[in-house]
Amino acid sequence: MANREPIPAGTNTRESLAAVAYFALYLAFSFWSPGSEMRNYLTLVAVPLLLVVLLRKGDPIHRRPAPVLASFGLRRGNLKTGVAAAVVLGLLLGLFQLTQRSAGPELWELIRTGKALYLFPLAAIFGLLTAGFTEEFFFRGFLQTRVEQLAGSPWIAVLVVTVAFGLYHVPFAYLNPHWPTVGDFPAALRLGMVEGGLGGLILGAAYVLWKRNLLACIVLHGMIDAVPIMTMIKFGGSGGG
């Protein structure tokens, strides 16, 4: 399938290699100290932005704020692409999760009592502002775009970053005491690669199909995380990621 949208101007091989190297370092560091939502704004947002600006030092046009943000998928004229579809898909995936998670019966009770009417939107907004923003900014906006520049194919980039997104969740599953896989590396690896990988595949494909509109992926990610976050708010637990 042909690329639906050209790679943003200014993206280069040096920038792409730096993105891959930074992910490898970040992943190794995560096994020593898993990230927090606040720290993710530094490690997954601020540092990638700074890297791009520094690596474009000799390109005064494309190191300006607008081209830099456009290279992540935040550009004028494209911020509405896919947003409505993201809301619909997010709702469908949320309903699907209700039938899959062990807390499903309790969550269905929230729906029957009407509490989900305010808990789901609040959880979705919280998810959008935390992992939805930071993880999409890094994995889709930064890493996937740069891997595509190296691979020459958006779909190869989707597959590579799907694996990366799954691996990213393994340290959390292994080290977080609230996760059922804490201390069990094979189980943590399976959980991270299955749940994280599936989410990464959906979000990566959406990024390509929705013309690299990062905002739509942020909305979708926040809505995917809303059900786990509702579980965390109402019943305790690890929440989403």
Image (tube, helix red, strand yellow):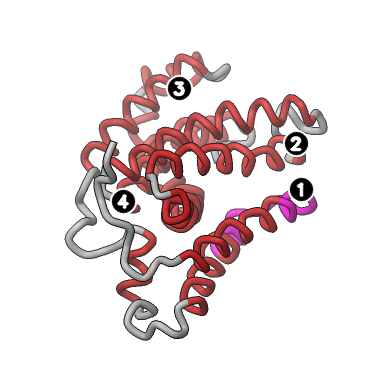
- State the residue position of label 4: 212
In this rendering, position of residue 197 left or right of residue 155: right
> How many numbered markers are drawn?
4
User: What residue is rendered at 76% in x and 40% in y?
Assistant: 175
Circle 3: residue type: Gln
Query: Disc 2, disc 3: CB below 8 Å?
Result: no
Earlier in the chain: of badge 2 and badge 3, it is: 3
Query: Is 187 covered by the magenta stretch?
Result: no
- Which numbered circle lies on residue 174? 2
Earlier in the chain: of badge 3 and badge 4, it is: 3
Magenta stretch bounds: 28-41
- Which numbered circle lies on residue 172? none
Residue 185: name its quadrant.
Answer: top right
Near mark 1 (Cα within 10 A), the count class, few <14, some 14-19 or many ≥20, is: some
Query: Disc 3, disc 4: CB below 8 Å?
Result: no
User: What residue is rendered at 67% in x and 26% in y?
Assistant: 190
Q: Nearer the viewer, residue 173 or 11?
A: 11
Circle 2: residue type: Tyr
What whole-number distance in Å separates the C-alpha atoms at marks 2 and 3? 22 Å
What whole-number distance in Å separates the C-alpha atoms at marks 2 and 1? 8 Å
Circle 1: residue type: Phe
Earlier in the chain: of badge 2 and badge 1, it is: 1
Q: Nearer the viewer, residue 123 or 100?
A: 100
